[in-house]
Image (cartoon, rainbow, N blue to C red):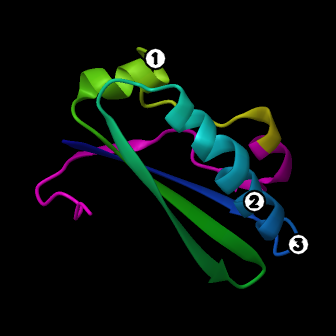
Amino acid sequence: MITRIWRGWTTHENAPVYEQLLRTEIFPGIAARDVAGYQGISLCRRELGNEVEFMTIMWFDSIESVKAFAGEAYEVAVVPPKARAVLSRFDERSAHYETIVQPPRR
């Protein structure tokens, strides 16, 4: 299993807008693509002084599954235009890790 981690930062004013965008459009859109090997996504949020950091953690069966999601240049972050409009800054590249202990399943 591969874990894909990415971070983006926004203002306190834009944080609820961005979170709503993720929950109602971006995450459902990812799921609707039905990428083979995509196992799910988690969202983390952290207040940092004058900005808010968001971190997404995605799980895939393999690097091939990640490539099916992100393309051959799979390390390049996938940031839709609506997200770019409310983010102050973001990681240009996603980090990929071999998952040693898998997330719990329900």
Q: Are marks 1 and 2 in contact (CB under 8 Å)?
A: no
Q: Is residue 27 above or below residue 42?
A: above
State the residue position of label 3. Answer: 13
Label 1 packing within 10 angstroms: few (<14), some (14-19), many (20+): few
Give the magenta range.
83-106
State the residue position of label 1. Answer: 71
Viewer-nearest of discs 1 and 2: 2
- Residue 92 part of the magenta segment: yes
Q: In the image, is 29 to the left or to the right of 38?
A: right
Residue at 18% x, 42% y is 1
Q: Amino acid at mark 1?
A: Gly
Q: In the image, is 94 to the left or to the right of 87?
A: left
> Looking at the picture, how far across and down is residue 106, in whole percent?
26, 63
Q: Amino acid at mark 3?
A: Glu
> Looking at the picture, how far across and down is residue 66, in whole percent?
35, 28
* Residue 77 can be seen in this image: no
Disc marking residue 44? none
Mark positioned earlier in the residue sequence (2 or 3): 3
Q: Using the numbered discs, state the Cα–Cα distance from disc 3 to disc 1 in whole angstroms.
A: 32 Å
State the residue position of label 2. Answer: 20
Spot the residue most to the left.
100
Residue at 85% x, 65% y is 14
Mark positioned earlier in the residue sequence (1 or 2): 2
Q: Using the numbered discs, state the Cα–Cα distance from disc 2 to disc 3 in whole angstroms.
A: 13 Å
* Residue 41 can be seen in this image: yes
Q: Residue 39's quadrant in the figure?
A: top left
Q: Residue 67's quadrant in the figure?
A: top left
Mark positioned earlier in the residue sequence (3 or 1): 3
Spot the residue most to the front.
106
